[in-house]
Image (cartoon, rainbow, N blue to C red):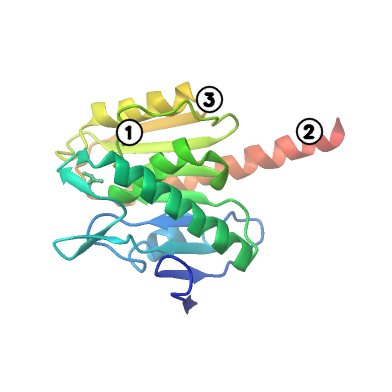
Amino acid sequence: MSVNPALSHIYRFVPGNDPTRPPLLLLHGTGGDESDLLPLGKSISPGSPLLSPRGKVLEGGMPRFFRRLAEGVFDEDDLRRSANDLAEFVEEARKRYGIAAPIALGYSNGGNIAAAMLMLRSQTLGAGILLRAMAPLSKPPRADLAGKSILVISGAHDPIVPPDCSEGLAETLSLSGARVDRRVLPLGHQLSQLDVKLSHQWLLEQTVREGSSANEATRA
Ligand code: MLT
């Protein structure tokens, strides 16, 4: 495990020890940091390489990935800039550690920047698990998300990201060609073991699906 501030973001990188597991890009929520989601990443995909940056924006001392004007009202210029900046960080880290395009695992503010990256820099990410996230851009570009799988999990009683917001996100991603699975759990904004279990299972299904597509391509 290493702490290395030399790239554009403060971050932690945990090397993987199972080559069959995809790398994860861990994106924390408001007030979190680069250590927050490491246990979640390890539970959802044991053995995966974990790349975990800290958001550069501070709101009342709390790290975030982009500025907001109010709860759920985003500074979209800053969001676009920050999503591109984060994508550059991921590209640099991929070269440094020799990892494939990672699966973004983002919670709340981290889920929102992951969604923006998928729309603005789709090639940087392999897939996405977006927990308690909403559609972050009011006029999203028509991204090319064909072949990308995205899991969106929201809470039925979430006062910060009500289910219709995550429904809008799922629709936007689907319209761009992504294969979207959306689940609504009987929960609020906080994560639970159910999120971990569903995300773990979903990721295993993706790995099996990719393995069988690769086998079919080899046979063809
Ligand atoms: C955001 O600002 O990204 C969302 O409102 C969620 C949050 O971080 O509170």
Q: Measured from the top left, where is residue 189 in percent x and y?
A: 21, 45
Of circles 2 and 3, which is in front? 3
The nearer-to-camera label among 3 and 1 is: 1
Residue 24 visible in rendering: no
Mark 2 or mark 1, earlier in chain = 1
Q: Which mark is residue 137?
A: 1
Measure the C-alpha gap from mark 3 to mark 1.
17 Å
Residue 84 showing in the rendered view: yes
Mark 3 vs mark 1: which is more N-terminal? 1
**Residue furthest right as drawn:** 219
Q: Element at badge 2?
A: helix
Which residue in the structure is indicated by mark 3?
Answer: 177
Image position of 134 (left or right of 188): right
User: Which residue shows up at 39% across the image and 40% down it?
Assistant: 116
Answer with left or right where residue 82 lies relative to residue 89.
left
Residue denoted by label 2 = 216
| Location of residue 18 with respect to 164 vertically, above or below | below
Q: Label 1: state its secondary structure.
A: loop
Q: Residue at horizontal 20%, vertical 33%?
A: 162
Q: Residues within 10 Å of mark 1 (few under 14, many from 20)?
A: many
